Image (cartoon, rainbow, N blue to C red):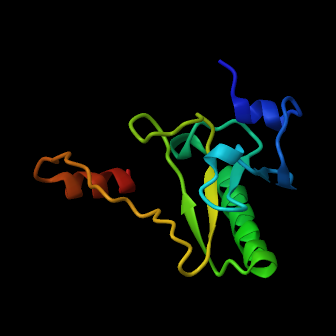
Amino acid sequence: MTCVFCELLAGEGRTTWVARRDAASAFLPLPESRLSPAHTLVVPNEHVAGIHDASAESLQAVILLAQEVARAMEASLGARGVNILSASGPGSDQSVPHLHLHVVPRWEGDGLDTWPSTASHRLLEDGWLDGLRASLTA
């Protein structure tokens, strides 16, 4: 199975690069997928399907580049806010199985609503919080 983001990182295909770093890169999504002007994707340079299997180094590189992009969006575009969006793993609506953060620049009154308008109807059994806490300490 080929990964479209890995292909782009390898120089196959066309994209508009925003930044290339040793461990992470940033590029513009396809125009029809952009939630706002300058919407940018930040990905680890190594293939990682999602947050569940990412190394600490990949996560650090991605979040630090996302911060760098957000600061540049404020400085150059006047976007004083950003939304950081990500979907990871089955059931999350992840469109490309390569960890990526959407850095979406925001301006006061821009009309974009990125907050979910619905909530999951999934019910959890009693004791779920204890189980979650136990998994965190394991």
Q: Position of residue 28 (x, y in %)?
A: 75, 51
Residue 23, placed above or below residue 91: below
Q: Is residue 7 left or right of residue 105?
A: right
Q: Residue at x 71, y 65 (%)?
A: 64
Q: Residue at x 74, y 39 (%)?
A: 46
Q: How many marks?
A: 0
In the image, 135 versus 99, the foreground residue is: 99
Residue 22, placed above or below residue 111: above
Q: Is residue 100 left or right of residue 61?
A: left
Q: Residue at x 86, y 29 (%)?
A: 12
Q: Is residue 13 left or right of residue 66?
A: right
Q: Residue furthest top?
A: 1
Q: Position of residue 75 (x, y in %)?
A: 79, 81
Q: Residue at x 60, y 45 (%)?
A: 54
Q: Is residue 109 left or right of residue 17?
A: left
Res 71 → quadrant: bottom right
Q: Residue furthest left?
A: 126
Q: Quadrant of the N terminus?
A: top right
Q: Position of residue 116 (x, y in %)?
A: 37, 59
In the image, 87 versus 40, the foreground residue is: 40
Residue 49, placed above or below residue 135: above
Q: Position of residue 13 (x, y in %)?
A: 84, 30
